[in-house]
Image: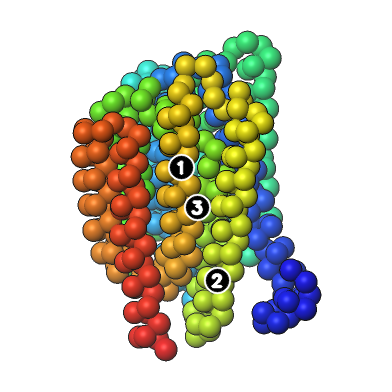
Amino acid sequence: MTTARVAAAGYAPSAFAATLARYGLSAGGPMAVSAAHFIASLIFLHTLAPAEFGLFSFLLIVVPFALSIAGSLLGPSLMAALRRAAGIDDATLATHLKANLVIAALAAIAVAALMFASHAGANVALLLGLYGGAMTLRAFGRAYAYSIKKPLRALASDIAYSASLIAGLAVLLAANRLTIAHAAIVLAAAASIGTCAFGPAYLARQLRPGRAGALGDYGAIWREWARWAAFGVVLTELTANAHAYLVTFISGPKAFAVLALGSLLMRPASLVLSALPDIERPRMAAKIGKNDAKGAFRTVREFRTAAAVIWVATILLAAALLMWFPHVILRKGYDETQALYVLGFWIVILGIRTLRTPEAVFLQAAGEFRTLARASLWSSVTSLAVTLALLLIAGPIVSLAGLVAGDLVMTANIFALTRGWKRANG
C-alpha cells in the first residue's frame, strides 16, 4: 500500500508503520511457537506410530483449552483494571499470581487425566500434565506482560520456549532416542524455560507472591467476572474442538491422527489467531475505558485485516508444500485424499473464525462475558450434536462439518451482540 493510499484510508504514515510494528511484534512470538509446533509435528509424524502422533496432536488441543480456561479465570479482571485509571495494584496482582499457581496445578492434573484417558501411559500422561501446568504459568506471564505494555517479555518467552523445544527434539533425533516419553520430557522442560524467560524477578514473585493480596479475594473476581468467562470458554471449546474429543475418545488417537495431519498445515493461522487477542484485547479495553468506541472498532478492523493476511498466507504456504514438497507432509500409510479433504474443511473453519474473532475479542474487552456465554450456548449444542451424529454416521472426516455448523451459529450470534452493543453505547 502506498503512502498516499494509506493517508487516503485515514492513517498517517507513522500510524500505519506503528500498526505494522505492533502486529509484527504481537505475531512474531506466536509465529515462532507455531513454527516450533509445526516442526515438532513433522518430526513426530515421521518417527512415531500414528497413534502416538495422534496423542501429540490431541495434546495440542487439550493444552490450549487449559490455557483458555486459565485466561478466562484471570484475564477479565486484568481487563477491568485496564479500564480504570489507577490500573492493577500490588495486592490485586498478588491475588492473581496466587490464583495462577492453583489454576496451573489444576491444569496439570486435568491434562494428565485427559491424556491417560486417551491411552497414553501413566508416566507419559504425568509428564504431559507437567507440560500443561508449566504452559499455564507461562500464559499468565504473557497476558500480564501485554497488560503492562511489555510485549518484548512475551516475545522473549515465546522464543525461549520454541528454541528449547526444537533444540531438545534435535538432540533426541541425533541420539536416536526419540520416543513419546522422551518427547514429553522435552515439552515440559521447554515450557519451564519459556516461563523462566520472564526474568528472575517475575519468576520469584510468581512462585512466592508474598503476603500482599489473598487467595480468598479471588472469590469476588469469580463472582463478578470469571464464572461467566469460564462458562463461555467451555462452550466455545465445544463449538471449536468437539471433533477432537469425540473422535479421540470414540474412534481412538489413530483415527484422530488423520484429522491432525490435514489440520497441521493450517496451524500457523490457528495459533496466531488465538494469540493476537493477547495484545489487542488490552488496547480495546483501554479505548473503551476512555469512551473511544470509534478507536476500539478501528482496532477491530486492523485485527481482522492482520488475521486475514495470515489466513491467506497460511493457505498459500500449504498449497506450496503440497505441490512441491508433498513427502514432507504425506507420510506413507496416510491417505492423501483424506488429508486434502481435512485441509479443505480447516480452511473454511479458520476463515469463519478469522471473520468473527475480532468482534469476540471486542466484546471481551467490553466486559460482555455473560452475554458471550449465552451466545455460545447454541453454537456449542449445534457443534456437539452435529459432530457426534456425523461421526457415528459418516466417520471422522465428515464430522468436521459439525464444526462448520457450530462456527456459523457462533459467528451470527457474535455479530448480533456487537450490533446490539453499538446501539446501546452510541
For marks 1 and 2, the one nearer the N-term is 2
Q: CA distance from mark 3 to mark 1?
A: 20 Å
Q: Residue at coordinates 35% horizontally, 50% vertically from top-left?
A: 404
- Residue 135 appears anywhere in the view: yes
**Front residue (pair 30, 308):** 308
Residue holding disc 3:
274
Q: CA distance from mark 3 to mark 2?
A: 16 Å
Q: Position of residue 97 (x, y in %)?
A: 47, 53
**Front residue (pair 405, 418):** 405
For marks 3 and 1, the one nearer the N-term is 3
Residue holding disc 2:
301
Q: Is residue 384 left or right of residue 192?
A: left
Q: Three-letter amino acid code at disc 3?
A: Ser
Secondary structure of the residue carrying numbered label 1: helix
Q: CA distance from mark 1 to mark 2?
A: 26 Å
Residues packed near mark 1 inside 10 Å, few (<14), some (14 to 19) or many (20 plus): some
Q: Residue at coordinates 50% horizontally, 52% vertically from top-left?
A: 274
Circle nearer the viewer, 3 or 1: 1
Q: Which residue is farthest top? A: 176
Mark linked to residue 344:
1
**Front residue (pair 43, 229):** 43
Quadrant where the image shows the N terminus: bottom right
Q: Residue at coordinates 73% horizontally, 76% vertically from top-left?
A: 5
